[in-house]
Amino acid sequence: MSDDRSFAEQAARTRAAWHRYQAARANTEASTIRLSAAAQRFMVVLQEGTDQEIAEHPDLAEINVMLDGYYEEPNPQ
């Protein structure tokens, strides 16, 4: 009888550990999703700030236009 009890107890502890693992995994996934969304918002704000700074400084805007022309592929006609 005690062997059955110890086996049942061990099985219950194993199931509990599995559920804790699944909960931690779900928590990690939720944190990753939240971080990903925050990183995307940060990149949008950073790009908007860079665009505004370039627009406010004519020298930077001119350099940006020159670089765009340099790095764009030629239009074959």
Image (spheres, helix red, strand yellow):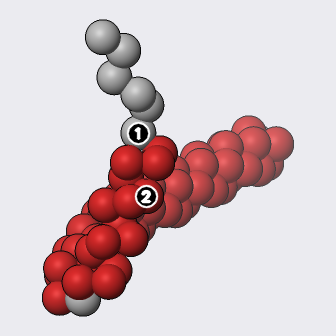
* 77 w.r.t. 42: above or below: above
Residue reaching furthest to the front: 77
User: On the picture, is 35 further left or further right than 10?
Assistant: left
Residue 56 falls left or right of residue 9: left
Residue pictured at 18% horizontal, 79% vertical: 55
- Under mark 2, the amino acid is Leu
Q: Which mark is residue 18?
A: none
Residue displayed at 27% across by 74% down: 61
User: Residue sitting at 38 percent across and 60 percent down?
Assistant: 66
Residue sticking out furthest to the top? 77
For disc 2, the neighbor class at 10 Å (few under 14, some 14 to 19, many from 20) is few
Q: Earlier in the sequence, mark 2 or mark 1?
A: 2
Local SS, label 2: helix
Residue on which disc 2 sits: 67
Read off the residue under disc 1.
Answer: 72
Depth check, front residue: 35 or 61: 61
Please state the horizontal and vertical placement of residue 44, each as a whole percent of the image.
Answer: 24, 68
